[in-house]
Image (cartoon, rainbow, N blue to C red):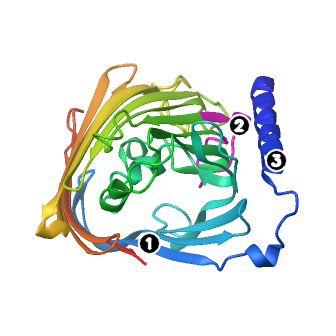
Amino acid sequence: MKKIGLIIEAFLLLAVVTIMSAQPANPIPFESQASPLSIDMQWFLFYQNGERDEQAFNEFALKRGYVNIKKTINPTFSGRITTDITVDREGDGEGDVEMRLKYLYLKTALPEFEWLNDPHIEVGLVHRPWLDFEQHINRYRVQGTMFLERIGVINSGDFGMVLLANIGGEVDEEYQKTVNSSFAGKYGSMAFGIFNGGGYHALEKNANKTVEGRLTLRPLPEKLPGLQVTGHGAVGKGNTAAAPDWRYGSAYLSYENPAVIVTGEFYRGLGNYKGTALKDALTVKALPQSGYSLFGEWKELMDGRISIIVRYDHVTRQYTISDRSTNRMITGLAYHFIRGSKIVLDYDVIRYDESGRADDHVLEAAIELKY
């Protein structure tokens, strides 16, 4: 623990020194630099009909609602607050629509250094390195969470600090305009951070800190700018008093162009961030897990207004008595009616290899509204 504490203190010291060096000798007065507040909103609303754990359901509901409030203070500092609005399905207020914070951080722009472009640090309730990157390639968070979050391995935000940067300038403007302008480093991007580990909606239940990172390379930026190769992973302890081991490593290959998006992820790990993935009920030994996820989107119908999506997830968990596997298939159609907004019709099936356990299946109509 002392080593982790020293690493965090060194990270903080480096951040403070860098921030101080980034300040102009004669700072521009605060009022002359301040910009208006930027406010945007995003809602996931759905109708679902199906069967889960052999229980039928049929409902209209809210999956998620986000309100993003951003403020530029001066050329170095900016801030963000994001509310996370959802339905309480398990707590004392079961059925209530509740609001909590997902992000609340100070963002500090750092001087560019050699091949690192647009480097910046977030401190507070911040992005973790992986899921924000993936969700800017797979645009269907409205259907459900991404692979590693869906199987309970990782979370999208947490208390801590994270350093992010692009690598080697920016990729071609035409690619950014027609395909993807996020994480637009010509040769890739990176993120590295230190976090409590329990996620943005959990208290810290032990003294451990989690180290997590992502490195993305764009090997052929001139000929195939949409091709990216990513490695990401984390090392820490699960967020319980017993603090079981938690670590994972994952390789991710993605290709994007104006017509198609194709991705493949291959994962291997031990335990999860919550500390609940254990080999059996009598031990705190972390559960070995592995799996993969494949995703594809074809965007050519009706001049790009209609997409076809397909996703397949597989995970194997190595319990003490026997291994258990889960396979999930998602197919759907999406209609894009406003920039960033869409209506999705999808069918989601989960098959378990456990003896006697029935499949889950969900037919869904979902709306993502961004404004």
Q: Nearer the viewer, residue 64 or 112?
A: 112
- For label 1, the crowd category at 10 Å Cα-Cα, with few meaning under 14, some 14 to 19 and many 20 or more, is some
Tell me the CA gap for discs 1 and 3: 37 Å
Mark 1: secondary structure: strand
Viewport quadrant of the N terminus: top right
Question: Magenta part mainly helix, strand or loop?
Answer: loop
Identity of the residue drawn at 46% across and 72% down = 95
**Comparing labels 1 and 3, the label whose residue is closer to the camera:** 3
Tell me the CA gap for discs 2 and 3: 35 Å
Q: Specify which label sits upstream in the sequence, 2 or 3.
A: 3
Q: Amino acid at mark 2?
A: Asn
**Comparing labels 2 and 3, the label whose residue is closer to the camera:** 3
Q: Nearer the viewer, residue 33 or 120?
A: 33
Q: Is residue 102 left or right of residue 52?
A: right
Identify the disc placed on residue 42: 1
Q: Is residue 332 above or below residue 336?
A: above
Labels 1 and 3 touching (C-beta < 8 A): no
The residue identified by callout 3 is: 21
Res 280 seen here: no
Residue 39 is one of the magenta-drawn residues: no
Identity of the residue drawn at 65% across and 55% down = 125
Q: Specify which label sits upstream in the sequence, 1 or 3.
A: 3
Identity of the residue drawn at 39% across and 37% down = 218
Labels 2 and 1 touching (C-beta < 8 A): no
Q: Is residue 44 left or right of residue 200?
A: left
Tell me the CA gap for discs 2 and 1: 34 Å
Which segment did they paint magenta? 194-211
Mark 3: secondary structure: helix
